[in-house]
Every structure is written in C-alpha cells, then in structure tokens.
C-alpha cells in the first residue's frame, strides 16, 4: 500500500509588535524587566572586579614566566578561567530578559588534531579565548563600573527620594545642615513660608518620582549595552558556523569512506563465498563433462550438464542479488519511490509501505543510493534476525516554513522480538556510518519483546 504524504500549514495570526500595543503596555513590560536588570547590573560589577583581579594577576604572571616551563600552562589556565567568567556573565544576562547569547565554537580543530601539545595549546589557537580574556580583564570592568555607578544613583535617588519623608526624620540635623531652609531662603517666591523640612521632602520626592519614572529606560538601556557587548565578544561568530560545517563535513566524509570500505570488503567476501565458489564448481563440472563426452558416456555427460546449469543459475542469482544491493537498475530507471516499493514487494514478509512519491524530485542520487542500501539491509535483517511476521516501511519529507523539503525521514518498523543494538563492527553500525556520511542521524529503538523501529533522518541537497 503506497500513500502520499503532504505537509500543510494553517495561516498563523500575525503577532502584534510591542510598538503596536501602546505606550503603557511597553512601559509595563520595561518595568517587569527592571528588577532583573538592576540585579544583573549590580552582580556583574562584582563579577568584573573579581575577574580583573584574577585574570590580570594570572596572565601577567604567566607572561613573565614564559621563559620557563610553567609560563605557558599558566597562560592557558588564565584563558580557561576567562572563559568561565565570560560564561558566568552570559548566564547573569538571562536575568535581564534579553535574548540568550549563543555559545561560541570552542573547538575549531579538525578530528586529527590530537596529542598532548595540540590539546594544551588549543585555547591559544582559538580567538574566542583571547576575546574572553580581553572582555574579563579590560572591557567588562570599564563598562561595569560605569553602569554600576549609574545604577546605584538611579536606585538610591529613586527609592530614597520616594521614602525620604520616612527615613529622613531619623537623620540628625545639626547646625548648618538644614539645606532645605537654605533653599527656601534662596527662592522665597517658590518656597515662601515653607519649613526647611518640607522643602527637603518635596525636592527629594520630585527627584524620586523623576528617577523612578525613568528607571526602566535607564537600567534597561544599560542592560542592553552589556548585552550588545556580550553578543559581540562572548557570543557566536559567523566564522563559528563555518568551522562547525567544516568539522561536520570532515566527520561525514570519514564516516562515508569507512562505510564504503566496509561495504567493499563485505562485497568481496560475499563474492568469494558465493558466486566465486559456484563458478569454480561450474568449471570443474564442465571439465568433467568434457571428459565424459570424449569417453562417449552420454548419460553421465547429460547429468553433469544439468548440474552445471544449476550452478550457473545459482551463480547468476547470487550476482543479481549482490548487484541489487549496490545499485539496482530500478533505482536508476524509475527512482527511489519505485525501488523502495519493489523492496517491500519482494520481501517474504507482509510489508506495509507509506512512500511519498515526491521524494524522487527532492532526493539526490547519492542520498537515494544510500537510502535504498539502508532500507535493503534493514529489510534483510528483519527477515533473518527479527522473527517478525510483518513490517512497515515509511518515508516522510520535513519541510520548512517556506514549504521547501529540508529532510527525509525513513523508518522501518517490524513486529519482531526486538533487542537490536548498534554494535561496533556489525551491520547496524555500518548503516549508521552510511547515514552519517550524508550528515544524517540514525536511530534504533528496539526494546526486548519488540517492536523494533529503525530510522534515518537525512538532510536533503537541493536538486535542480
């Protein structure tokens, strides 16, 4: 049974932007983030003071000791500690409610970059460590000091001004300390007849109101300034994505090469154990047939001819089976969907198929060959090892918001005894490496007692 799957997306309502919700709504959201921003601005100052003390001491000590052995490990240790301070800063930024700063790529080495010295000097060869060091030792202390001073001013004046009427009464008021009376005398047209205490309370209250009203904007702006610096210095760069792509490509290429090597050795073994042995037997039968024919023993010659014919047919069947596992003509002529249907039809088990015909338009030839090989091996394993009476072969295309197919999911599910595991050197490990060669993911779920579900999640390459 073949069914076609389609992806449809219902229209989604457009979310209103903050600017469309009105001033008071935006102001309320800013106030909701203010406590977290204030806590961050105070805590990051403490973190910056600790980081500059620790990092400056360790780094310059390490630089001074570079002439001896201990200097290089000390510099490396400083870089690792700087990374820790940077991660702590990024973690504290979560208090502000601003977007999370993405983790950078810490290991840009290729898989073959191993050994003691390569591992030891890895932080020295990664620019992120040095930027984290500059942030923790120079940039963060400077901007944290400025933001801490402004934060304490706004918090103290805002909160202190609003509550001065209460706590101001407990302050001793000595001679010459009544500045409210001095202001009242200086501007009698404004505070004529007011007491010094009333003037102080009024001015503190006005200042408290102004600083409290502007507090969300000031503290929010300072927090966004820290966030912008952290995003540029502590976050992920565009080159990190390229480095990750290079490593993933190298890993995929290595997995593909290893999988092909294993497949070639297996094919060589199968040819040696199957068709080659049958052809040797056929050669021996033909030689015996020639001797019987020369001796005039027609009955024995006929019997040998029948046996030789059987061996030739068996060798031909073996060769066809081996060639179908490599690149069947049906896959080349009619596409992957038809080839998968043929695999299900040719299985001795009952197989339900749910294959999307659209896969032929979006799956490249390389991916199609790998998918066919993986499914063929899985169907063979189901027949030989699972004890199943039926199976399901299902494919599905994963699409993005624009409707473009981005991944192909292939699943083979059987109702057998279960217990299948991926073991190094065995069949499922080889299939995992083949899928990894396409930078895909291979999943095996097989509890004891069944059912067994094996799937491949393969990224697609656009086909013109």
Image (spheres, rainbow, N blue to C red):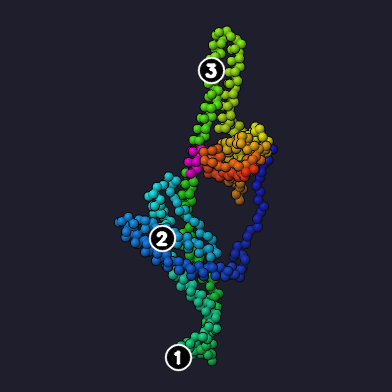
Please give the name of the residue rendered at 44% of the width and 46% of the height, measured from the top-left corner. Answer: 110
Mark 3–mark 1 CB contact (< 8 Å):
no
Residue ID at (65%, 32%) = 346
Which type of secondary structure does the marked residue at label 2 adopt?
A: helix
Mark 1, residue position: 175
Work out which quarter of the rendered image holds the N terminus and state it: top right
Of tags 3 and 1, the one toward the viewer is: 3
**Disc 3 target residue:** 284
Disc 2 and disc 3 in contact, CB within 8 angstroms: no
Label 1 residue SS: loop
- Gap in angstroms between the C-alphas marked 3 and 1: 127 Å
Query: Where is residue 119 shown, x and y percent of the image?
Result: 40, 50
Span colored in magenta: 251-260
Instruction: Tell me the distance, in whole angstroms, between the alpha carbons under discs 2 and 3.
Output: 78 Å
- The C terminus - image quarter: top right
> Is the C-beta separation of discs 1 and 2 under 8 Å?
no
Say whether residue 278 is visible. Answer: yes
Q: Which mark is residue 133?
A: 2
Q: Earlier in the sequence, mark 2 or mark 3?
A: 2
């Amino acid at each position: 049974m073949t069914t076609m799957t389609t992806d449809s997306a219902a229209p989604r309502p457009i979310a209103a932007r903050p600017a469309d919700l009105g001033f008071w709504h935006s102001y309320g959201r800013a106030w909701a983030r203010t406590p977290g921003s204030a806590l961050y601005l105070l805590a990051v100052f403490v973190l910056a003071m600790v980081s500059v003390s620790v990092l400056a001491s360790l780094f310059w000590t390490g630089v001074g000791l570079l002439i001896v052995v201990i200097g290089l490990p000390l510099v490396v240790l400083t870089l690792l500690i700087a990374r820790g301070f940077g991660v702590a800063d990024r973690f504290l930024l979560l208090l502000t409610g601003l977007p999370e700063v993405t983790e950078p790529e810490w290991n840009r080495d290729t898989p073959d970059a191993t050994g003691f010295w390569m591992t030891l000097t890895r932080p020295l060869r990664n620019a992120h460590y040095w930027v984290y060091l500059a942030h923790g030792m120079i940039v963060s202390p400077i901007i944290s000091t400025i933001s801490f001073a402004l934060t304490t001013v706004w918090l103290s004046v805002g909160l202190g001004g609003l509550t001065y009427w209460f706590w101001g009464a407990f302050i001793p008021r000595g001679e010459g300390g009544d500045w409210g009376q001095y202001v009242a005398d200086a501007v009698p047209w404004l505070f004529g007849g007011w007491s010094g205490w009333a003037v102080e309370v009024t001015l503190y209250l006005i200042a408290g109101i102004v600083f409290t009203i502007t507090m969300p904007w000031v503290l929010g702006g300072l927090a966004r300034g820290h966030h912008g610096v952290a995003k540029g210095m502590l976050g992920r760069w565009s080159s990190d994505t390229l480095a990750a792509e290079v490593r993933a490509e190298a890993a995929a290429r290595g997995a593909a090469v290893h999988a092909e090597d294993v497949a070639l050795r297996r094919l060589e073994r199968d040819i040696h154990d199957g068709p080659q042995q049958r052809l040797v037997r056929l050669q021996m039968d033909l030689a015996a047939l020639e001797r019987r024919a020369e001796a005039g023993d027609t009955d024995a010659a006929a019997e040998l001819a029948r046996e030789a014919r059987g061996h030739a047919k068996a060798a031909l069947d073996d060769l066809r089976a081996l060639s179908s596992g490599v690149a069947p003509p049906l896959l080349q002529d009619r596409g992957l969907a038809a080839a998968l249907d043929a695999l299900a039809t040719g299985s001795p088990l009952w197989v339900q198929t749910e294959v999307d015909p659209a896969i032929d338009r979006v799956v490249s030839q390389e991916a199609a060959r790998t998918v066919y090989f993986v499914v063929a091996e899985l169907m063979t394993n189901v027949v030989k090892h699972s004890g199943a009476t039926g199976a399901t072969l299902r494919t599905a295309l994963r699409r993005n918001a624009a409707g473009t197919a981005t991944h192909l999911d292939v699943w083979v599910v059987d109702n057998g005894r279960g217990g299948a595991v991926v073991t190094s050197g065995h069949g499922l490990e080889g299939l995992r490496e083949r899928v990894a060669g396409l930078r895909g993911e291979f999943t095996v779920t097989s509890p004891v007692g069944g059912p067994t579900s094996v799937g491949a999640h393969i990224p697609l390459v656009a086909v013109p």
